[in-house]
Amino acid sequence: MTARTSFVTAARIIDEHPETVRSWRHKRLGPLGEIGEPSGRDLLLELREVMLLALVSALNNQNRPLEVSAAVAPRWLDYVDLVATGQLGADDRNVYAVEARYPDGHVTRYVADGVDQLQEAMAAVAGSAAISVLNLSELVARVQTGWIIATRGVDAARADYLTHLHDVPEGERAALLAEFDRVASRVAPPPRLKRAGRVTANGTFAPEATPEPVQVLSKPRVKA
């Protein structure tokens, strides 16, 4: 059975407000109008669909119109799959999506596997009018972390996360754990505490009493 998560949780994973993401889907831009499986009043999404939303969010944050972000995101999705499965970005290399726009409207795109290829891509588009670079490895890592937290719970996800940090230097390890905690606080916020009640004089616990109903007059009485 394919794992899915709720629409609200997917929005939290990509760090967007649920209503913002819902509006993207309602506009039916590109594949956004087709994502998700209805479940009652909710919408359930697969991991790849969350990755697509994360791409749209990242591209939209580069000051692009939403329509352009939704059209471009699917072009990078197959490369996101390759990063997620380890077919790109081996040996901890970052994978970058590079896009260059020229004055005549022409667009050139490169996928750079590692810093060396990124430098080659940047040299190739040096004469363009505008260049945007998106770190696909970081995007995949954030979404995968949020997905594991959402589907397995914070404690299990953190234990699994720690197993991959044994050989990481202490300073970098602390930064990665801090990032994990930021994602966890967003994806699985702690439950709101209920009113605790009070402790009586003899040391027993008593819940907060229900306040007496207050009668509200239809018209306030004003004393002359």
Image (spheres, grey):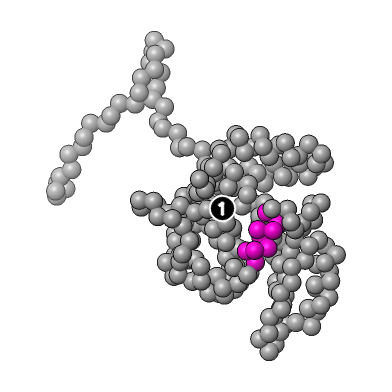
* Quadrant in the rendering for residue 111: bottom right
Looking at this rendering, what residue extends furthest in the front direction? 1
> Magenta residues?
76-84
Residue 66 visible in rendering: no
Q: Residue at x 63, y 70 (%)?
A: 75
Q: Residue at x 60, y 72 (%)?
A: 72
* Foreground of the two, 84 or 141: 84
- Residue 215 on the magenta span: no
x%, y% of residue 77?
Answer: 62, 64
Of helix, strand and loop, which one carries label 1?
Answer: helix
* Quadrant in the rendering for residue 130: bottom right
Q: Residue at x 74, y 64 (%)?
A: 96
Q: Is residue 125 above or below residue 7?
A: below
Residue 74 placement, left or right of 43 = right
- At label 1, the amino acid type is Leu
Question: Which residue is under mark 1?
Answer: 47
* Foreground of the two, 34 or 58: 34
Q: Residue at x 39, y 17 (%)?
A: 205
Q: Is residue 130 above or below residue 5?
A: below
Looking at this rendering, what residue extends furthest in the bottom direction? 104
x%, y% of residue 163?
Answer: 72, 36
Overall secondary structure of the magenta section = helix
- Residue 78 on the magenta span: yes
